[in-house]
Amino acid sequence: MRLQDTAVRRAQHFYAPPPGQRPDAWDLVPPAERVWRWYEQQMQRRVTPPAGVLLGASIYARINHGRWVADCPCGSAQVVTPDDPRFACPECGYGWARLEFPASPAAAEAEVSAKAPHERNWWHDQDHSAWDRTRQPPPEKDRGQPPEPEPVPEDPKPEEPAGAGPKGSTSR
């Protein structure tokens, strides 16, 4: 199997029913809500998805090690999908927020498809806050030249008091 044949994983493929259930048991559950079913199975406790939508809230989706993921402000992350661009966190209860995907998710997936799975990372162009995004070092002015020292400002000279002039002179 070639690397290009391994697709980027999406929520509908990542969050699957446990082995005791039929593989299609969650087919009628929207992909963004499958994390809640999966979380209940893994943590063995009841969780309820939020009822409302956070107006104006959006989160950038990114590809991380071959999976579409979104980071919650609490530090948790879930696998997401462009097929259902919503996000809510079962860890902290962060309400439903809109996910920002690229205009063409398939193009982003194709961009990383030739890389090894652990190197399949992609970030949205406008996401400057991603904690794991590789950053380019700032360009140096004159490469190879040591930076010039900054000029040292001179200490201000004390001003002469008003009315003071040369010795022996009087001002009237």
Image (cartoon, helix red, strand yellow):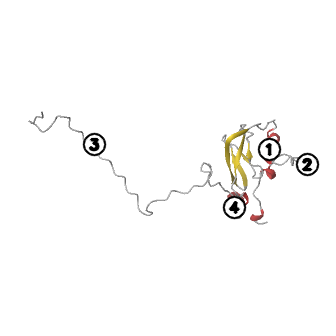
Quarter of the image where the N terminus is located:
bottom right
Cα–Cα span, label 1 and label 2: 18 Å
Name the residue located 41 percent from the left edge and 62 percent from the top edge. Answer: 145
Tell me the amino acid under the disc marked 3: Pro
Please rate how many residues cluster around mark 3, counting C-alpha atoms within 10 Å: few if below 14, some from 14 to 19, many from 20: few
Q: Secondary structure at mark 4?
A: helix
Name the residue located 55 percent from the left edge and 57 percent from the top edge. Answer: 136
Q: What number of labels is visible? A: 4
The quarter holding residue 97 reads top right
Cα–Cα span, label 1 and label 4: 26 Å
Residue of label 3 = 156
**Horizontal side of residue 18 vs 51, given as left or right:** right
Which mark's residue is nearer the viewer, 3 or 4?
A: 3
**Horizontal side of residue 37 vs 113, given as left or right:** right
Q: Position of residue 116 (x, y in %)?
A: 70, 61
Please rate how many residues cluster around mark 4, counting C-alpha atoms within 10 Å: few if below 14, some from 14 to 19, many from 20: many
Name the residue located 79 percent from the left edge and 39 percent from the top edge. Answer: 43
Tell me the amino acid under the disc marked 2: Arg
Q: Secondary structure at mark 3?
A: loop
Cα–Cα span, label 3 and label 4: 59 Å
Q: Position of residue 44 (x, y in %)?
A: 82, 37
| First-in-chain label (1 vs 4) | 1
Which mark's residue is nearer the viewer, 3 or 2?
A: 3
Which mark's residue is nearer the viewer, 1 or 2?
A: 1
In the foreground, 105 or 26: 105
Whether tag 1 and tag 2 are in contact, CB under 8 A, the answer is no
Residue of label 2 = 22
Tell me the amino acid under the disc marked 4: Val
Residue of label 1 = 33
Residue of label 4 = 112
Cα–Cα span, label 4 and label 2: 32 Å
